[in-house]
């Protein structure tokens, strides 16, 4: 454990109190997720129900989803209740949920959740990361009822193509703030044209 653990000594009266913490938060979050997945299901539900809006456990939840595959129906119900908004930005809870669905790789559950999306989706985030787009495209490619997709951020072309190819009812695609190459634009047009032939 040398280098992984910090030991803090505090002198109190006639004794020394030792406290420990891990050197890097990511390891602590992983170990927290590992511990949570070992709890009885009702305790897992109680913890996630009370902490889904707590940003300090967001990474632990992503690890938890990857470790468990989000197979617990009770946890699914506690975490993914209610309709999803029709707008997404980089600080949005729905983006966090898409991250979690991606980490779980639970395709049937992802398909079930994304059907709760409205037919029009507006993604207005100036600074989505590659991982954000990977998670979004993974989830939105499981959604078959999108009719309008409005994107006002820089988006990698391959992720938009993946979303378009799997949404046969998509009739409006509006993308702003992009720096596509000519080949990227041609490829996207071909993807959209192939949709119209379906």
Image (cartoon, rainbow, N blue to C red):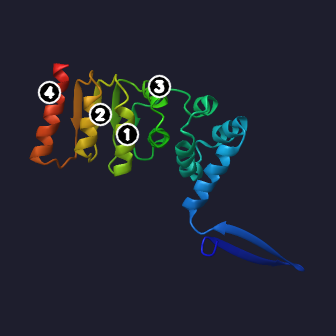
CA separation, marks 2 and 3?
Answer: 16 Å
- Asked whether the beta carbons under mark 2 and mark 1 sit within 8 Å of each other, the answer is yes
CA–CA distance between discs 4 and 3? 28 Å
| 10 Å crowding of disc 1: few (<14), some (14-19), many (20+) | many
Where residue 112 is drawn, which disc sits there? Answer: 3
Mark 3 neighbour class, 10 Å CA radius: few under 14, some 14 to 19, many 20 or more? few
Give the residue pinned by disc 1: 136
Disc 2 crowd rating (10 Å Cα; few below 14, some 14-19, many 20+) is many
Q: Residues within 10 Å of mark 4 (few under 14, many from 20)?
A: few
Q: Secondary structure at mark 2?
A: helix
Q: Which residue is mark 4?
A: 193
Contact? badges 4 and 3 (CB < 8 Å):
no
Residue 163 is marked as 2
Q: Secondary structure at mark 3?
A: helix
Q: Which circle's residue, 1 or 4, is located before the other in the chain?
A: 1
Q: CA distance from mark 2 to mark 4?
A: 14 Å
Element marked by disc 4: helix
- N-terminal of the pair, mark 4 or mark 3, is 3
Name the N-terminal-most of marks 3 and 1: 3
Question: Which mark sits nearer the N-terminus, 2 or 4?
Answer: 2
Q: Nearer the viewer, residue 127 or 110?
A: 110
Q: At 34% across and 50% down in the image, what residue appears?
A: 130
Can you give x and y, in whole percent of width and height, for residue 94 in the image?
Answer: 46, 38
């Amino acid at each position: 454990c040398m280098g992984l653990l910090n030991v803090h000594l505090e002198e109190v009266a006639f004794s020394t109190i030792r406290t420990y913490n891990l050197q890097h938060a990511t390891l602590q979050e992983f170990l927290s997720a590992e511990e949570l997945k070992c709890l009885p299901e009702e305790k897992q539900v109680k913890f996630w129900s009370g902490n889904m809006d707590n940003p300090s456990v967001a990474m632990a939840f992503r690890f938890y989803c990857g470790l468990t595959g989000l197979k617990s129906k009770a946890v699914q119900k506690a975490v993914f209740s209610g309709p999803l908004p029709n707008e997404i930005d980089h600080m949005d809870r729905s983006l966090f949920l898409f991250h979690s669905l991606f980490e779980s790789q639970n395709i049937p559950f992802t398909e079930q959740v994304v059907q709760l999306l409205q037919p029009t989706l507006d993604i207005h985030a100036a600074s989505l990361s590659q991982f954000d787009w990977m998670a979004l495209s993974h989830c939105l490619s499981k959604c078959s009822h999108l009719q309008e997709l409005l994107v006002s951020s820089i988006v990698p072309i391959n992720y938009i193509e993946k979303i378009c190819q799997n949404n046969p009812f998509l009739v409006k695609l509006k993308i702003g703030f992009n720096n596509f190459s000519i080949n990227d634009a041609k490829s996207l047009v071909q993807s959209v044209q192939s949709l119209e032939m379906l």
